[in-house]
Every structure is written in C-alpha cells, then in structure tokens.
Image (tube, helix red, strand yellow):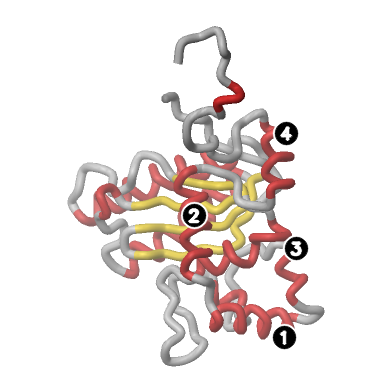
C-alpha cells in the first residue's frame, strides 16, 4: 500500500517525533543537546515555524510546533537534520545519520489536545520526583516560569490556563505533577507515529475535507454483508 502524504495543516500545532535509527542515541552529551537546540532555533526561524515545546531524550526528540506554510515542517526538519548530523559526525568521528529517515507527526486540535500534547513533549526527560524543577533539556522550565526560553513561542491557548503568568504557571505545574494517564499518552504518541489527526471526530472530519487526505484509519474487518453485491460469488 502506498504511503499517505504527510498530513500538514498550516496554522495548527503539530506533534513531531523523530527517533534514532534502530533506537541508537542521537545525543551523546550535553554539548550535542545544546547544539541541537541552537540549530532548531535557526531552522525554525528560517522555515516560518513557531516552536511551542520540546523534549530531548537520548534516542528521540519530541516537538510541538506550528508551521506558517505547507512546507514549513519538512523544510525545518530537513535543514535541522543536515546541519546537526554534519556537526555530530565530525565531532564523534561518524559517517552516517543517527536518525530514522522520516520524522513522524500529527496535526493537533488545540482546543482539545494542546496541553496534553505539550505534556507528552515536555515529559520527555523530565523528572519531578525530587520537586517541581524539570530537566534542563525540555521547554518545561519556560512554561513553569523558571526561565525565559527564546526558542519557545507560547501558543495562544496556553494563555487560557490563567489570566496572569503566575496563574498559568501554577495551572501547568499542577498538570505536570498530575501527569497524563499512560493510555492517553500512548494514544497521543500513536497518532504521531501513524500520522492520524489528533482531535475530536468533528475536527478530524473537517481536517480531512480541507486537506483531501485521509485523517483516520479505515475500519477493520470484512465489509458488511449487506454491502456485498449479490450477483458476485463470495
């Protein structure tokens, strides 16, 4: 079966997951992570993409970002891959890319899934066991009011968490401490892995009509017997 084209909707947030090839590490030290974030900031600006959140794992990157145009995500990720891999290979004496060839992504309905998707992104590498301070390689500290991250553009709906920065930070801190149900987190990541839209039925159907691209999996199983032509052998 032919692969569906990537689902992209300019002006809406997208959850992006880019994994290491065969689970190999894509960052070997903190200098690699800092290089990746500097390069991400440059490539996002050039491609017209607003980055709302990021989380770096040893073998995976998660991003929440909104592109201005149809090609924004692809342009950003391709440029980021070329620039980062070139520097990574020179530094570590390697010759091939550590990444899977294709990043995975899904369009996110912001009213329903912006905060859950942001939690999935920022929970990558974040530990709250000893207190509310997040790990340094996520954008969580920005949303918790612990530092200003110039890479992050806050989504308008994030401001709906409170009327003041203190209220928003407190509400998001509470959401982080509560965490997502594991099944919900798995559902969100599965949508990104398979490229299906993440939202209510109304949102998913509307997005499919607007993009002309299938936005959900086909129903499983054999067709209903009532739909099978009677004049054909079964």
Q: Secondary structure at mark 4?
A: helix
Q: Secondary structure at mark 1?
A: helix
Alpha-carbon neighbours of circle 2 within 10 Å: few (<14), some, or many (≥20)?
A: many
Alpha-carbon neighbours of circle 4 within 10 Å: few (<14), some, or many (≥20)?
A: few
Q: Is 147 rendered above or below residue 153?
A: below
**Sequence-earlier tag: 2 or 3:** 2
Q: Is 219 rendered above or below residue 104?
A: above
The residue at the far bottom in this view is 130
Give the CA distance from mark 2 to mark 3: 21 Å
Question: How far across and down, in percent of the image, does residue 112 sit?
Answer: 69, 60
The disc label shown at residue 156, or none? 3
Alpha-carbon neighbours of circle 3 within 10 Å: few (<14), some, or many (≥20)?
A: few
Q: Secondary structure at mark 3?
A: helix
The disc label shown at residue 40, or none? 2
**Sequence-earlier tag: 1 or 3:** 3
Residue at image position (58%, 38%) is: 7
Q: Secondary structure at mark 2?
A: helix
Q: Which residue is mark 1?
A: 166
Which quarter of the image is occupied by the C terminus? Answer: top left
The residue at the far left in this view is 93
Q: Nearer the viewer, mark 3 or mark 4?
A: 4
**Sequence-earlier tag: 2 or 1:** 2
Residue at image position (59%, 57%) is: 51
Q: How many marks?
A: 4
Please give left or right for residue 125 compared with residue 75 in the image: left
Please give left or right for residue 24 compared with residue 189 in the image: left
In the image shown, does 98 or 21 lie closer to the viewer? 21
Tell me where residue 197 sits by quadrant: top right
């Amino acid at each position: 079966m032919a692969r569906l084209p990537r689902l992209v909707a300019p002006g809406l947030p997208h959850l992006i997951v880019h994994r290491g090839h065969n689970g190999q590490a894509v960052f070997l030290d903190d200098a690699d992570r800092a290089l990746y974030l500097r390069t991400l900031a440059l490539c996002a600006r050039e491609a017209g993409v607003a980055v709302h959140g990021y989380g770096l794992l040893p073998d995976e990157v998660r991003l929440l970002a909104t592109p201005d145009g149809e090609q924004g995500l692809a342009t950003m990720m391709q440029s980021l891959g070329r620039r980062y891999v070139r520097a990574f290979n020179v530094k570590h004496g390697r010759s091939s890319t550590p990444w899977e060839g294709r990043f995975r992504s899904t369009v996110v309905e912001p009213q329903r899934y912006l905060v859950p998707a942001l939690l999935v992104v920022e929970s990558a590498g974040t530990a709250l066991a000893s207190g509310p301070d997040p790990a340094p390689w996520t954008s969580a500290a920005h949303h918790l009011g612990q530092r200003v991250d110039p890479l992050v553009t806050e989504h308008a709906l994030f401001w709906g968490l409170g009327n003041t920065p203190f209220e928003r930070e407190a509400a998001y801190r509470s959401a982080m401490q509560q965490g997502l149900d594991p099944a919900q987190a798995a559902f969100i990541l599965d949508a990104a892995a398979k490229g299906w839209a993440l939202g209510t039925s109304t949102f998913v159907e509307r997005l499919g009509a607007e993009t002309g691209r299938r936005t959900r999996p086909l129903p499983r199983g054999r067709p209903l017997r009532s739909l099978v032509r009677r004049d054909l052998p079964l």
